[in-house]
């Protein structure tokens, strides 16, 4: 039993960390942004956190906060042109951003260690901490979804012209979403650095971009549980079927195509929808009770 | 020296333009941002390579084969990926996501086909010959590249503005539903635009593969970044814009590499993208679409 | 008083003049109709007032405040609400949630409070939901509250859109063909609702095709043809105006 824990602990930690990346992507999609910048934010957070922890006396907590602030700054920077542009422009610029972060981290060797990356980073993250962070993050996102920000996100995502006609500033909420996605992405990168002793530029490249988007699409873009379920699925499946491990990118690519075409809601939202449909088939009064509406 | 660098930049830029034309054309007409366009380019280069080394073809037939191959891959993408999505009312976001997926699948297949190796054309596949023009050293290769790009672009323009299919494509670009009422078959138009875009990308793939004598399953990614800048600079959906911006970017990039630093040329390119988005998101040439402003 | 004024408003798309030299004033508490044949420029006028399109010439003011040049959400916050010609609801959301979104203008919690889920956020949420519920009751659609908006009938969707606009408590409400696709009973109900709103002081601008509907409820009617104002007045005077007859019968 102890053996089993020792074997699967690293995988468990990675699931938690990659779920954080998926949440960064989730925030962007929820707000109606076509942003694929999560991997770039993760890179900034990873290097900033590792650098601060190793080279300064700030300690783990403040280094983490510093990393998150860097992510917020990067998100706000991207939002300067992108909050008022839509669709294809956002996808283009954020993919470019991810690629540029990879080449910058190769170029800025004095800070990032170039292709070798940063090594011998103290391990300051524990499995317990990671679980706690994922739980707090989910709670936070659930709260945001139910309040005014979530309403504004929903409106902007579904029809931004309508949103504007109701007085919702698409600019303001897009900026907020970029900043939040940046903060969460940077947090994930920082946790990766704090948990795995070393980071290199290729951790934060196109494969991470694909992972984050695939996890959210697969798990579901609406409910908070979606990204977590998607992450677990994508991380555990290759462990169960070993041959799949080498074909990770092929698997994710094929999944993206098939899920978007045939099951666009993803796992969690698809199940929720099915439950609602059954709910609607029940008698009207039971439905009213469940939704807390007064009797007709 | 400056003139020489300028010339080199124009040649590289011509290939960027060739590649970006297909990307901007498909976006302008169908509102599809095809992120697998780089993979089509890469497959063009691969087909060219295998035609030369495997089938022992001469360069010209191999080039033509690569163009056809690029068109085929591109059309297959539309039929197998974008069309099923259209049928299920997928939105712009969905098309971007499936094109990322298709890119991965195509890259993976290429990785298998090449054993993840970088391939090189046999030495001397292209005659090395230099001319002296206006005090510049111009290689035969450069002349052939520019001539090939010019020919393909002229063919594209003739197609777009002279043929029925061309007018149909422009009608579909303006309004798909109305054009259907006019008896235009949108499937034929999708087929046409994807075939052309793929052919141009395939051609660009072979040209760049020979020019740098390097073909690998990863070669589609860097050129996508360049093409992003090109199509934004030229205005998303604008054909003349992509042409001019392609050449411009080739020049800017070459000069950056020579006079500043080769490692920073990516950063300069992205900086340019950022500045254009900030200052003039519609590009310097109007695209085919105008949208309501909101913010 | 606080009217919504268009002053020599113009818009051209390329070489085509969609609207030209249009001067109008809409008063609060009054029902004004904007009618005209297809392509007369009615929707262009609405899009200019709500900021989706920038006018090429002229100015728009609300109570002496400049409207043109402001962004769409700023104009909405000045108190100008609208509905769309081809109903635009958030189809994934429930009917109730669609209306709740309309209360955005009355939201006072900061982004920070909202992110942390402080108590005012939940108070506001409860409050908006209760008010949305009241609107649904008033319009007789309360039984559809929990249904996804895309699944109710087209006429009901139009009403939900009107409720969503009303949630903003606007000073002016621009209705773009609200009776299109409604049967006689539905459009008569809608007429009654619109009269109620005007009685509460909301200025109504009604863009309509359905002449009978306009003639019945509008106090002032403005007729556009090819982007120009060709007649203004009560239903009676407009109906007899030779220019109007020519425009509609095609001359």
Image (cartoon, helix red, strand yellow):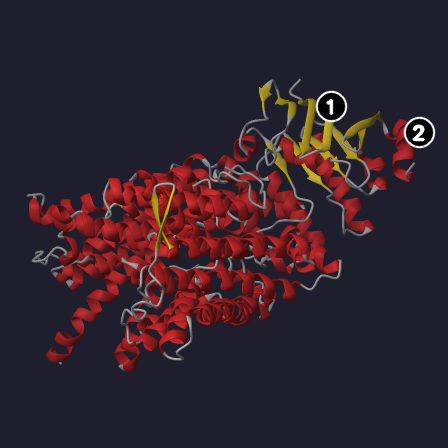
Left or right: residue C54 versus residue A79 is right
Identify the disc placed on residue A294: none
Q: Earlier in the sequence, mark 2 or mark 1?
A: 1
Question: What is the chain identity of the residue bearing mark 1?
Answer: C
Which residue is tagged 1?
C21
Query: Is A152 located above or below residue C4 in the figure?
Result: below
C-alpha span from label 2 to label 1: 21 Å
Question: What is the chain identity of the residue bearing mark 2?
Answer: C
Give the number of the mark in front: 2 or 1. 1
Instruction: Give the residue at x 29% y 49%.
Output: A100
Where in the figure is residue C85, as x and y percent of width and height?
69, 45
- Kindly tell me whether residue A153 is visible in this rendering: no
Query: Is B180 located above or below residue A235 in the figure?
Result: above
The quadrant in which the C terminus of chain A is found is bottom right
- Residue C26 image-quadrant placement: top right
Which residue is tagged 2?
C242
Where in the figure is residue C174, as x and y percent of width and height?
68, 35
Where in the figure is residue A276, as x and y percent of width and height?
52, 67
Where in the figure is residue C66, as x and y percent of width and height?
58, 21
Looking at this rendering, what residue extends furthest in the front direction? B132
Count of marks, rendered view: 2
Q: Regarding mark 2 in the picture, which secondary structure is present there?
A: helix
């Amino acid at each position: 039993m102890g053996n089993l824990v020792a074997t699967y602990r690293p995988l468990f930690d990675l699931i938690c960390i990659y779920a954080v990346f998926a949440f960064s992507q989730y925030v962007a999609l929820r707000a109606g942004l076509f942003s694929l910048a999560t991997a770039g934010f993760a890179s900034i957070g990873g290097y900033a956190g590792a650098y601060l922890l190793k080279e300064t006396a700030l300690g783990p907590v403040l280094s983490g906060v510093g990393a998150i602030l860097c992510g917020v700054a990067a998100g706000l920077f991207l939002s300067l042109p992108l909050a008022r542009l839509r669709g294809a422009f956002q996808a283009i610029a954020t993919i470019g951003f991810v690629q540029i972060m990879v080449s910058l981290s190769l170029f800025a060797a004095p800070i990032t260690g170039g292709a070798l990356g940063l090594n011998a980073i103290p391990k300051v993250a524990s499995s317990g901490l990671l679980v706690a962070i994922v739980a707090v993050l989910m709670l936070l996102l659930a709260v945001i979804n139910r309040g005014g920000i979530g309403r504004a996100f929903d409106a902007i995502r579904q029809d931004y012209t309508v949103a504007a006609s109701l007085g919702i500033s698409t600019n303001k909420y897009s900026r907020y979403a970029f900043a939040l996605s940046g903060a969460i992405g940077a947090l994930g990168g920082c946790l990766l650095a704090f948990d795995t002793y070393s980071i290199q530029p290729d951790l934060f490249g196109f494969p991470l971009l694909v992972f984050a988007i695939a996890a959210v699409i697969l798990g579901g873009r609406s409910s908070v549980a979606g990204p977590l379920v998607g992450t677990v699925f994508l991380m555990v499946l290759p462990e169960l079927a070993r041959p799949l491990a080498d074909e990770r990118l092929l698997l994710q690519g094929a999944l993206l195509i098939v899920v978007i075409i045939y099951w666009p809601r993803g796992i969690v939202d698809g199940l929720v929808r099915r439950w609602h449909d059954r709910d609607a088939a029940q008698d009207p009064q039971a439905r009213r009770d469940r939704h807390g509406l007064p009797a007709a | 020296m400056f003139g020489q660098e300028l010339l080199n930049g124009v040649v590289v830029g011509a290939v960027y333009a060739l590649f970006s034309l297909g990307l901007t054309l498909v976006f302008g007409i169908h509102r599809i941002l095809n992120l697998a366009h780089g993979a089509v380019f890469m497959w063009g280069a691969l087909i060219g390579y295998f035609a030369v080394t495997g089938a022992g073809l001469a360069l010209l037939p191999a080039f033509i084969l690569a163009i056809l191959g690029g068109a085929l891959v591109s059309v297959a993408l539309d039929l197998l990926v974008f069309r099923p999505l259209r049928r299920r009312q997928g939105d712009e976001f969905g098309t971007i996501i499936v094109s990322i997926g298709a890119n991965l699948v195509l890259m993976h297949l290429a990785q298998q086909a090449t054993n993840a190796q970088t391939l090189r054309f046999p030495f001397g596949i292209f005659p090395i010959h230099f001319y002296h023009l206006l005090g510049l050293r111009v290689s035969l290769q450069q002349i052939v590249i520019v001539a090939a790009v010019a020919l393909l672009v002229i063919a594209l323009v003739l197609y777009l503005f002279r043929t029925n299919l061309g007018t149909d494509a422009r009608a579909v670009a303006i309004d798909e539903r109305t054009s259907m009422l006019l008896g235009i078959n949108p499937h034929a138009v999708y087929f046409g635009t994807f075939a052309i875009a793929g052919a141009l990308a395939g051609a660009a793939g072979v040209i760049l593969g020979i020019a740098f004598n390097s073909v690998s399953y990863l070669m589609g990614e860097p050129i996508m970044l360049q093409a992003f800048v090109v199509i934004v600079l030229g205005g998303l959906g604008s054909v003349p814009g992509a042409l001019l911006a392609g050449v411009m970017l080739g020049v800017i990039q070459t000069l950056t590499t020579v006079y500043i630093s080769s490692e920073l040329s990516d950063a300069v390119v992205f900086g340019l993208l950022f500045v254009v988005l900030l200052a003039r998101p519609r590009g310097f040439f109007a695209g085919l679409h105008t949208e309501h402003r909101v913010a | 008083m606080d009217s919504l004024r268009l002053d020599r408003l113009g818009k051209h798309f390329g070489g085509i003049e969609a609207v030209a030299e249009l001067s109008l004033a809409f008063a609060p508490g009054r029902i004004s109709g904007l009618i005209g044949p297809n392509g007369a420029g009615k929707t262009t006028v609405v899009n200019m007032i709500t900021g989706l399109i920038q006018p090429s010439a002229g100015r728009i003011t609300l109570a002496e405040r400049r409207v043109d040049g402001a962004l769409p959400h700023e104009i909405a916050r000045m108190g100008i609400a609208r509905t769309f010609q081809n109903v635009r609801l958030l189809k994934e959301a429930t009917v109730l949630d669609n209306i709740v979104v309309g209360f955005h203008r009355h939201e006072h919690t900061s982004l920070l409070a909202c992110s942390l889920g402080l108590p005012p956020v939940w108070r506001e949420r409860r409050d908006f939901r209760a008010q949305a519920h009241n609107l649904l009751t008033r319009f007789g659609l309360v039984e559809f509250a929990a249904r996804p908006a895309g699944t109710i009938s087209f006429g009901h969707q139009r009403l939900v859109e009107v409720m969503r606009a009303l949630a903003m408590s606007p000073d002016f409400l621009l209705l773009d063909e609200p009776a299109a696709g409604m049967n006689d009973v539905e459009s008569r109900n809608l007429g009654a609702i619109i009269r109620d709103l005007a009685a509460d002081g909301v200025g109504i601008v009604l863009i309509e095709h359905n002449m009978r509907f306009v003639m019945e409820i509008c106090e002032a009617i403005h007729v556009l043809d090819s982007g120009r104002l060709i007649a203004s007045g009560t239903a009676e005077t407009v109906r007899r105006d030779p220019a109007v007859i020519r425009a509609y019968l095609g001359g």
